Image: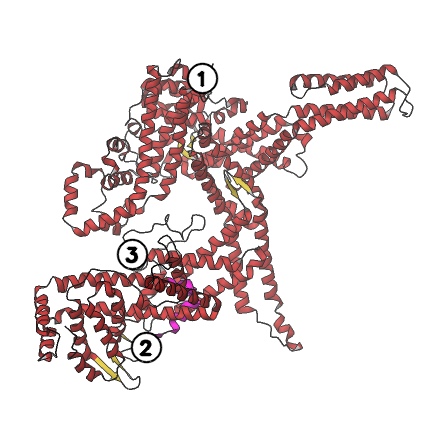
Amino acid sequence: MLDFLAENNLCGQAILRIVSCGNAIIAELLRLSEFIPAVFRLKDRADQQKYGDIIFDFSYFKGPELWESKLDCKPELQDLDEEFRENNIEIVTRFYLAFQSVHKYIVDLNRYLDDLNEGVYIQQTLETVLLNEDGKQLLCEALYLYGVMLLVIDQKIEGEVRERMLVSYYRYSAARSSADSNMDDICKLLRSTGYSSQPGAKRPPNYPESYFQRVPINESFISMVIGRLRSDDIYNQVSAYPLPEHRSTALANQAAMLYVILYFEPSILHTHQAKMREIVDKYFPDNWVISIYMGITVNLVDAWEPYKAAKTALNNTLDLSNVREQASRYATVSERVHAQVQQFLKEGYLREEMVLDNIPKLLNCLRDCNVAIRWLMLHTADSACDPNNKRFRQIKDQILTDSRYNPRILFQLLLDTAQFEFILKEMFKQMLSEKQTKWEHYKKEGSERMTELADVFSGVKPLTRVEKNENLQAWFREISKQILSLNYDDSTAAGRKTVQLIQALEEVQEFHQLESNLQVCQFLADTRKFLHQMIRTINIKEEVLITMQIVGDLSFAWQLIDSFTSIMQESIRVNPSMVTKLRATFLKLASALDLPLLRINQANSPDLLSVSQYYSGELVSYVRKVLQIIPESMFTSLLKIIKLQTHDIIEVPTRLDKDKLRDYAQLGPRYEVAKLTHAISIFTEGILMMKTTLVGIIKVDPKQLLEDGIRKELVKRVAFALHRGLIFNPRAKPSELMPKLKELGATMDGFHRSFEYIQDYVNIYGLKIWQEEVSRIINYNVEQECNNFLRTKIQDWQSMYQSTHIPIPKFTPVDESVTFIGRLCREILRITDPKMTCHIDQLNTWYDMKTHQEVTSSRLFSEIQTTLGTFGLNGLDRLLCFMIVKELQNFLSMFQKIILRDRTVQDTLKNLMNAVSPLKSIVANSSKIYFSAIAKTQKIWTAYLEAIMKVGQMQILRQQIANELNYSCRFDSKHLAAALENLNKALLADIEAHYQDPSLPYPKEDNTLLYEITAYLEAAGIHNPLNKIYITTKRLPYFPIVNFLFLIAQLPKLQYNKNLARRYLKFLQMLWEPFCSWRIMFGTQSCPGGLLKHMCLISFLMSSEQCCNCFFLLLQWKDCP
């Protein structure tokens, strides 16, 4: 008969593809559950207030027109809705596709069952497929995986969140209107069940059977599948567990499948007592906590509480005497096998001969270890017990008492078992690879010994006191030929014949009285030894490895293992070499990947890589989490070293008096530093002892693990220092800015020095790591702060600065700013507020206008450079750019509102335009005309002035930042500064030449040179903030005349300062710097031609010393409209 899984068997391939797809869907659901946008949970009051009117559950479908009309009535809600769509449509679509695939899965399964019943697959029916071993497994798995999908969705993605995501997709996506869209069916399947995974949450009635029945499935199929699972060992696991007390462990995977599938036919759970008694006696006689898929555990005491028949059947298992018996038995077994394993792990005990002679004994020990570990881990897990349930607590307390449970002892048993298993597997793999070579070697050696003995008895080769014996000579030659004739490929016949040859050699020694000659005896003994080795070698079977793989399954602990993390880390802290044993445990845990990947691999599915990457990535993340204790411990020692070096150890001068030598020796502190440094080296050595390991499909390099761990710890500590160090009290006088920057600078310097100190001891590039991680922290925080000014936010999973392995921590905002860089920027803006301070350009200093005391100066930016480096200053500059854009957008809105929509202001401006036209002579009665216009527009100048002052203030700060960046670049990297300046000038010269002669080259659109060089120039401070175009806008009516009136309105506030030979406004930033920015902000594209003349005039006024005369000249300026 054709193999069911053969490529040309359409029936087998169809169900195999369905099962393969099911495993891939579960992996995708688990992956997506970690990326649920928090906003869909609506847990925070702020989220509820902001998004409550645009995020809907399924109540939306009762009257979508009503909800949409409410949105249409409020433009601000429409804008928020559009912004929300832009930010979340990608992830919502990904979730929808996952939900759609679940529905498609069950539709495909139902179609397959219909095809079987209708005879589409020739000679195949549901009954014949269930009679086939592979067919039986695949049909059971297909239904089981569908149930697991539904349970995973409800556990990982709450019902309300699902509904909100589906409604959002319905509202935002155009795909839902397509003809083949099955949106209604998906919504019916995945609507909220009322289930909550929170501890203590009440279980909804008829859950999960009502959930499982939302899509009807062939009842006879369900019944037949349950029948097979009840009666058969569908995976033939019992052969790997020959002892009867191990039967429930052998059938554990089948028991998990049966548990899930029974919910598709809940009548068995409710009323079929005989069937439930049979199921419990077979699968759950000594266990009631099971793992249903990749470590998702279920306690049957709770799960079967609502079902009468199931609950009754389970009572025998849960009888306290049975609980006591099982707990005591596993306590005894674990103590016995732990002693055995420790004996096996002693150096030199597991030799090849010993292993080959004791395979059954070693496998029995492995079985006992794994069964005891499984039972104790599952039945003592906190996740398997609801503390609010009195019966749960009673059973668990009974287990803890009778099993004498100690998590450290259990962990040690797991560690030793994993190590024992790993060594055995490696030995068997090596023996299997060398099996034929060794067998042929032993055969050759044995044959040669017999040939040599034949020569001895021929009398040709002299040997002490051995007489010639032609019979023995012929016999030994025949034995030699018989040994050579043994065939490796026919192992059964070769083994039988080898045993006969051994017996013949024993008999010849006894009957021919050869014992008297020690040399002949030695030859015979050696030959028998080689023949024994041949038997041992021929008995090395791959089945032993398969049995070890089955017995060593640790998939049930995929999630439970996390409860032992603290014990693992404490063990590593005490003994860093423990990492080598942990390596075996991680590899044992990697065996769990076989469960979801087997069918995907058999089906040659393209999902193999993504599913492998997900589960391997999860395991590697756990390995990183456990081993992170090493960098943490190293940093703890480093902080002590830095403290000693900074505060205790005095630097030795170049010249020193002999009598002061003892004082400078400081043997105690120096010994402490040496001791701490040695501890760091030991930690490093510990992690490097773990060899390069393939975990799933991901190669884990211990050196890379160490470096990533150090980076992660550095990022965590630096990010926390930046967050904590840059929190300001806005009411503090004077400002806390400079003291906090100095304090933070000392902290950052300590980190920097510690990295400089450690790099040689752990063999890493300290400076490189420091610069990369600090820049990443600052750039990420700038990016998150700038999100406030963007419609389309950059999510963490989209950020080029955020990392899965080395995550940058996020902290709860303490004010309107999201991050420390926002708080720093707003504190600088607060203390340099143009309403409260005066900026003296020549001194680069801000003074308080009331007290005339210095508020801050250019030293502030030097301090920021020292503390946060170039990255910090550059990030601050980028944030100011976003703020300026925001202010300009607000200005445009304000200009539209108070000027272009105000009829009175427009009439005034029109009358003024008429009064001064045509522009051919001096305006008659100009003073009266101008001041009349100013008086009529007086109400607009306050808002106008405030907008200009804000932008001007930020432009001054950007200039100061650029100056500091340029200074430090020239000082620290003069060659880089010179190269950038020359390249910039050359590029500008080429571009100017192109515009004069278009035949000359110009960078193409896809050429990133200009974009890339701009980033370097801004980082080096080689740019002018006043020449930056922030926004573009259409031509604004009345803009030149409004600016002209604004200037005249503000000129009386100018004051002349003889000491500085300048005029200053009472609010200095009010005119000069802001107007410089306005000149460029709107540019020649957006401003009327006359505006540039106004700006030139303003520049002249601000640099002239004759303010009053200028005022008169301004009034009579002939080109002014």
Q: Which is nearer the eye, 97 or 219?
A: 97
Q: Earlier in the sequence, mark 3 or mark 2?
A: 3
Name the amino acid type tagged 2. Asp
Q: Earlier in the sequence, mark 1 or mark 3?
A: 1
Q: Which mark is residue 646?
A: none
Q: Few, some or many C-alpha atoms within 10 Å of disc 1 (few <14, some 14-19, many ≥20)?
A: some
Name the amino acid type tagged 1. Asn
Q: Quadrant of residue 1055?
A: bottom left
Residue picked out by circle 2: 841
Give the magenta part as a residue range: 850-874
Q: Which is nearer the eye, 30 or 884?
A: 884
Q: Does 400 lie within the magenta span?
A: no
Q: Secondary structure at mark 1?
A: loop
Q: Quadrant of residue 311?
A: top left
Q: Position of residue 292 (x, y in %)?
A: 41, 31
Q: Position of residue 1090 (x, y in %)?
A: 19, 70
Q: Position of residue 277 (x, y in %)?
A: 40, 20
Name the residue at 12% across, 79% down.
Answer: 922
Name the residue at 48% across, 54% down.
Answer: 711
Q: Quadrant of the C terminus?
A: bottom left
Frontmost of labels 1 and 2 is 2
Spatial distance from mark 1 to mark 3, Cα to Cα? 61 Å
Q: Position of residue 430 (x, y in %)?
A: 63, 33
Residue picked out by circle 3: 788
Spatial distance from mark 3 to mark 2, Cα to Cα? 32 Å
Frontmost of labels 3 and 2 is 2
Q: Earlier in the sequence, mark 1 or mark 2?
A: 1
Mark 1 and mark 2 residues within 8 Å of each other at the beta carbon = no
Residue picked out by circle 1: 132
Q: Secondary structure at mark 2?
A: loop
Name the residue at 51% across, 45% down.
Answer: 567
Q: Does 855 lie within the magenta span?
A: yes
